Image (cartoon, rainbow, N blue to C red):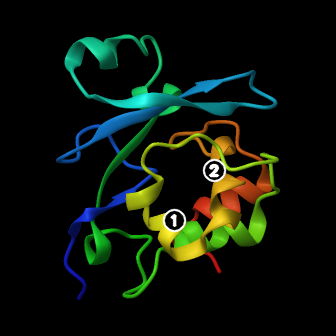
Amino acid sequence: SVPPDPNVLCPSARPEMDGAVIFGVIQGDAEAPRAGYLAVPQAITDEVLRLADPVEPTEVFRIAAPCAASGCRHFDGGACRLARRTVQLLPIVAEALPPCRIRPRCRWWRQEGRAACLRCPQVITDNYAPTDAQRLAADPDGA
């Protein structure tokens, strides 16, 4: 069992997680949503979360929080399967590394490097219209 490490951040976290911050906002349209990265990650407050109404905050915001490690269904004991499957299954959508402020502490960056960052802008935590590849990548019981 690997305990959580407060110095390593999950870039696909939920707003109720301890230490969670917003580091991106989903832009674009339903066919090509992309995260825009904030210059400074923002604390999560009820007021900020209400900005997402009428949809869930996880449809609008990219949220980071300390990686739960073995406490997460995507963690296989040594690595994040979500990061691995994102790199294996999703297309590259960025030509250069996005201007992400959590990168130095990001689990996906530390595990998969540049390959994860070039795919990260298309990730939406709660995506109700995922592509087949996104659905497969997000399945904690998948390959």
Q: Residues within 10 Å of mark 2 (few under 14, many from 20)?
A: many
Q: Quadrant of the N terminus?
A: bottom left
Residue 143 versus residue 43 in the image, above or below: below
Measured as percent of width and height from the top left, residue 71 is found at 26, 71
**Front position in the image: 55 or 109:** 109
Q: Which mark is residue 108?
A: 1
Taking 46 as reference, is 117 left or right?
A: right
Q: What residue is shown at x 60% (from left), y 39% (from top)? A: 127
Measured as percent of width and height from the top left, residue 131 is found at 77, 48
Measured as percent of width and height from the top left, residue 26 is found at 59, 27
User: Does residue 46 appear in the picture of this structure?
Assistant: yes
Taking 39 as reference, is 37 left or right?
A: right
Q: Earlier in the sequence, mark 2 or mark 1?
A: 1
Task: Give the CA separation, mark 2 to mark 1.
Answer: 9 Å
Taking 75 as reference, is 138 left or right?
A: right
Tag 2–tag 1 contact (CB < 8 Å): yes
Label 2: state its secondary structure: helix
**Front position in the image: 72 or 105:** 105
Taking 127 as reference, is 28 left or right?
A: right
Q: Residues within 10 Å of mark 1 (few under 14, many from 20)?
A: many
Q: Which mark is residue 100?
A: none
Dot 2 corresponds to which residue? 120
Q: Quadrant of the C terminus?
A: bottom right
Give the amino acid at mark 2.
Cys
Q: What residue is shown at x 71% (from left), y 31% (from top)? A: 33
Q: Quadrant of residue 88?
A: bottom right
Query: Number of callouts in the render?
Result: 2
Q: Quadrant of residue 117?
A: bottom right
Give the amino acid at mark 1.
Trp
Q: What residue is shown at x 38% (from left), y 49% (from top)? A: 13
User: Does residue 86 appear in the picture of this structure?
Assistant: no
Q: Quadrant of residue 124?
A: top right
